[in-house]
Amino acid sequence: MDFRVHAMPTEVLERVRKESAGPPRPDVVRLTAEGGEQIRCCLRNARAGEELLLFNYEPPIPPSPYQEAGAVFAHAEPCAGAEDDGYPADWRGGPRVLRAYDERGWIHPNSRAHDGTDPEGALAEVFADPAVVQVHVRNIAYGCFMFVATRK
C-alpha cells in the first residue's frame, strides 16, 4: 500500500509563528528544546537547544463530532520541512495509534494501535478498507497528533 505522509500545513505554521511574535499568550508558548520533542513541521525529534513553539492544533477532518485539538511542537522559525513523504525515520519503532477516518470525518473501525515494528504494514492494514480516506498517526502515551497519512 502506497501512502503519503503530510506534515502540519504551512499556513497553520505561518499563522502560529506570527501570533507568537506578539505579546505572550497562554495558548502559544515559546521554549527551548530539551531534545526528543516530536516536531510536527519537519516530522522529526528535536535536538537540544532548538527553539520551539508549543500550541494547540486541530488536525484536518471534515466538520464532524470527531474533531479534536491537542498540544503539538513546531520550530519557532521556518525550517526545511519534512525530508520526504515516507514514514518519519525518527518515529520508526515507537508504538502509535492509527486513527482512521472516513470521508465524513468520522472515526472508522479500522483504527488501531501498533507496536511500531512495521508502520508501513500497519498503515496498509488500515487503508485496506476503501472507506478509509485518511489516518491520523498519534503518540500512544499522550494521544498527541503526529501527522496525517493518505493514499497516494
Image (cartoon, rainbow, N blue to C red):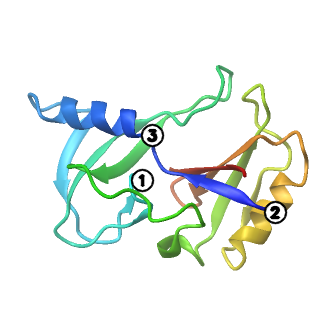
- The CA span between labels 2 and 3 is 24 Å
Q: Residue type at mark 3: give it.
A: Pro
Q: Which mark is residue 1?
A: 2
Tag 3 residue: 9
The image quadrant that residue 62 belongs to is top right
Mark 2 falls on what kind of element?
A: loop
**Frontmost residue, 70 versus 122:** 122
Q: Residue furthest left?
A: 23
The amino acid pointed to by label 1 is Arg
Residue 40: assigned label: 1
Q: Earlier in the sequence, mark 3 or mark 1?
A: 3
Q: Is residue 91 left or right of residue 55?
A: right
Q: Quadrant of residue 21?
A: top left
Distance CA(mark 2)–CA(mark 1): 23 Å
Amino acid at circle 2:
Met
Q: Residue at x 66, y 74 (%)?
A: 116
Residue 103, given in percent of the width and then of the height, sits at 78, 30
- Please name whichever residue, 85 or 125, is drawn nearer the observer in this view of the structure: 85
Q: Quadrant of the N terminus?
A: bottom right
Label 1 neighbour load within 10 Å: few <14, some 14-19, many 20+: many
Query: Are dots 2 and 3 in contact, CB under 8 Å?
Result: no
Q: Compared with residue 127, is residue 56 higher up or lower down, i.e. above or below? A: above
Residue projecting furthest to the right: 129
